[in-house]
């Protein structure tokens, strides 16, 4: 699990969108993937290794994320076959789903 406090001072808000700030979906996906990487790399067998982003599917965005929101991130390891693994990730604001996706990663 991870927490991201979304601040109006984030550089990406200058262009997305200047009139009505919304956190870009690709950055929400990146945040979910980073939480998954931290989780998988915290396992003893993966100490000293790196996690590479392999793909994303079934990404869905349910509500906008705005300045002042606290993004609650989670990623659950679903299965792993050798160095390739799959996870289900979610991002919530005030307990409500903002985004979800399925992630693929490779451990090296």
Image: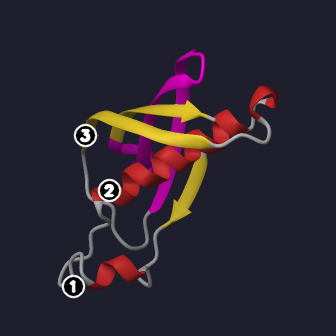
Q: Nearer the viewer, residue 11 or 64?
A: 11
Say if 19 sits above or below 85 in the image.
below
Please identify the quarter of the rendering in which residue 101 is found: top left
Q: Earlier in the sequence, mark 1 or mark 2?
A: 1
Residue 82 counted in the magenta span: yes
Left or right: residue 64 versus residue 29 is left
Q: Which residues are magenta?
A: 70-99
Is disc 1 placed on a helix, strand or loop? loop
User: Which one is closest to the eye, mark 1 or mark 2?
Assistant: 2
C-alpha gap between disc 2 and disc 3? 11 Å
Give residue 71's position: percent from left, percent from top: 47, 56
Say if 66 sits above or below 50 in the image.
below
Left or right: residue 95 versus residue 4 is left
Is disc 2 placed on a helix, strand or loop? helix
Q: Which residue is mark 1?
A: 18
> Mostly what secondary structure, the magenta segment?
strand
Q: Residue shown at 71%/40% (left/top)?
A: 49
* Image quarter of the C terminus: top right
Q: Residue shown at 65%/37% (left/top)?
A: 39
Q: Which residue is mark 2?
A: 26
C-alpha gap between disc 1 and disc 2? 18 Å
Q: Residue shown at 47%/46% (left/top)?
A: 32
Task: State how many labels appear.
Answer: 3
Is disc 3 placed on a helix, strand or loop? strand
Say if 1 sits above or below 79 in the image.
below
Which residue in the rendered view is the most extreme toward the front? 108
Which residue in the rendered view is the most extreme toward the left? 19
Q: Nearer the viewer, residue 29 or 65?
A: 29
Q: Earlier in the sequence, mark 2 or mark 3?
A: 2
Q: Which residue is mark 3?
A: 60
* Image quarter of the N terminus: top right
């Amino acid at each position: 699990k991870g927490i991201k406090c979304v601040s109006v001072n984030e550089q990406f808000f200058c262009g997305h969108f200047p009139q009505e700030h919304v956190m870009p979906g690709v950055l929400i996906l990146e945040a979910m993937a980073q939480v998954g990487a931290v989780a998988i790399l915290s396992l003893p067998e993966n100490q000293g290794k790196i996690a590479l982003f392999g793909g994303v599917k079934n990404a869905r965005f349910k509500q906008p994320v705005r300045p002042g929101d606290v993004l609650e991130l989670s990623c659950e390891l679903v299965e792993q076959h050798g160095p390739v693994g799959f996870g289900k990730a979610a991002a919530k604001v005030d307990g409500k789903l903002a985004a979800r996706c399925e992630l693929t990663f490779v451990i090296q």
